[in-house]
Image (cartoon, rainbow, N blue to C red):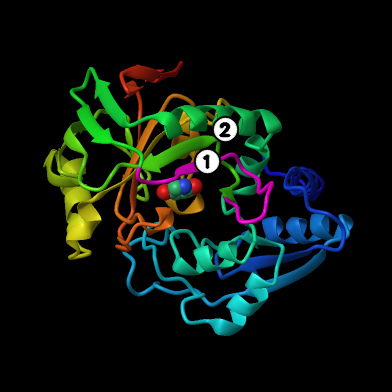
């Protein structure tokens, strides 16, 4: 079953409304070769119906010859905006950028936000966008969790599979993702419903064991045989296990960048309408895997860049790893218990 234009226009109308966009404001729809045409068409119609001044900026794809994956989140840091002054001029003048091509982790994204703009990323298939349509309740849930995370100074993650990792928190901002941009300077991602922060540089230590069924992104694979990741002073120093481990390790090694093994953001999922099984129903190139990233009760950790959070690490290799059945404690207090949100 697919989504009708009417449904998708309604969905865009709700997201633009939640973002507080008013008639006369300007929206630039950012597209590229992989942009879903129905998503683009319905975004433009919904923005027009709201009386917004709508422009579309189509950018040339980049990194195609560098990335080993077609997933836009696989090779991050440089984008079609890198060095593209004309494109930056229109985007910095826009009140809202609808990113239908994926700028995530780019310095240009920060530049646009710093000029008071808003950026909403939306590249999942239309039916996923509609099923995970953001609500005010999503925002309230994420912001409530964010207040707890912001106050925390340490995170301790454990699991029956053998995960036991600790890290210090507090040096980086909180990444709040609830699917709409309700104030200037905000980036968000529709669909989402989760939060994260970055561990203090060099502070993560212990072991993370990816159990059967945990997920690797951008691989879009459900782990079959456990992968044991050794974490020392903020870096993954060893990856061992079976074929899954070999595939992960050889992929990360292909970047020839020691920074690729650094721990990046750590957080947990709060989206009850996201499901673990969804990724298995999609060809791997037809989704970026937001269901596993957002599913309520996951522990989501990642490796690679922290420039997103104001850090200096801009490695191109970014791996997102949503895990089930973990217990996440902040200053000794559980926020997720064996995969269930407290
Ligand atoms: O929405 C996203 C997607 C990927 C990621 O690493 C963070 N947030």
On residue 215, the disc is none
In the rendered image, the vertical position of residue 237 relative to residue 31, given as above or below: above
Evaluate whether residue 224 shows in this view: no
Residue located 51% across and 30% down the image: 147
Label tally: 2
272 in the magenta segment: no
- Say which quarter of the image contains residue 336: top left
Q: Nearer the viewer, residue 48 or 201?
A: 201
On residue 143, the disc is 2
Magenta range is 171-187
Residue located 72% across and 47% down the image: 19
| Left or right, 169 with reference to 82 | left
Q: Which residue is mark 1?
A: 176
| Left or right, 170 with reference to 248 | right
Give neighbour class at mark 2: few <14, some 14-19, many 20+ (Cα, 10 Å).
some
Query: Are the two marked residues, 1 and 2, in contact with CB atoms closer than 8 angstroms?
Result: yes
């Amino acid at each position: 079953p697919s989504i009708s234009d009417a449904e998708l226009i309604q969905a865009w109308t709700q997201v633009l409304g939640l973002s507080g966009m008013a008639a006369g404001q300007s929206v630039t729809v950012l597209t590229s070769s992989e942009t879903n045409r129905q998503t683009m068409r319905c975004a433009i119609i919904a923005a027009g119906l709201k009386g917004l001044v709508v422009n579309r900026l189509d950018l040339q794809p980049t990194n195609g010859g560098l990335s080993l994956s077609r997933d836009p989140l696989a090779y991050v840091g440089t984008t079609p905006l890198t060095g593209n002054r004309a494109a930056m001029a229109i985007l910095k003048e826009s009140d809202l950028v609808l990113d239908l091509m994926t700028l995530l982790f780019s310095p240009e994204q920060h530049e646009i936000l710093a000029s008071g703009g808003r950026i909403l990323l939306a590249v999942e298939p239309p039916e996923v966008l509609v099923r995970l349509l953001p609500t005010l309740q999503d925002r309230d849930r994420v912001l409530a969790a964010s207040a707890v995370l912001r106050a925390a100074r340490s995170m301790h993650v454990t699991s029956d599979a053998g995960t036991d990792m600790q890290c210090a928190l507090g040096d980086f901002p909180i990444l709040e993702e609830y699917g709409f941009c309700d104030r200037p300077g905000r980036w968000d991602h529709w669909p989402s419903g989760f939060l994260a922060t970055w561990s203090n540089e060099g502070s993560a230590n212990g072991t993370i064991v990816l159990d059967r069924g945990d997920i690797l992104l951008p691989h879009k694979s459900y782990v079959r045989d456990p992968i044991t990741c050794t974490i020392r002073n903020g870096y993954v120093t060893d990856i061992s296990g079976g074929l899954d481990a070999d595939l992960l390790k050889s992929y990360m090694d292909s970047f020839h960048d020691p920074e690729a093994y650094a721990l990046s953001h750590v957080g947990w999922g709060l989206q009850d309408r996201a499901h673990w099984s969804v990724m298995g129903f999609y060809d791997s190139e037809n989704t970026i895997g937001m269901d596993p990233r957002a599913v309520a009760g996951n522990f989501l950790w990642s490796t690679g860049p922290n420039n997103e959070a104001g850090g200096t690490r801009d490695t191109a290799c970014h791996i997102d790893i949503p895990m089930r059945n973990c217990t996440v404690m902040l200053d000794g207090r559980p926020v997720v218990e064996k995969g269930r949100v407290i």
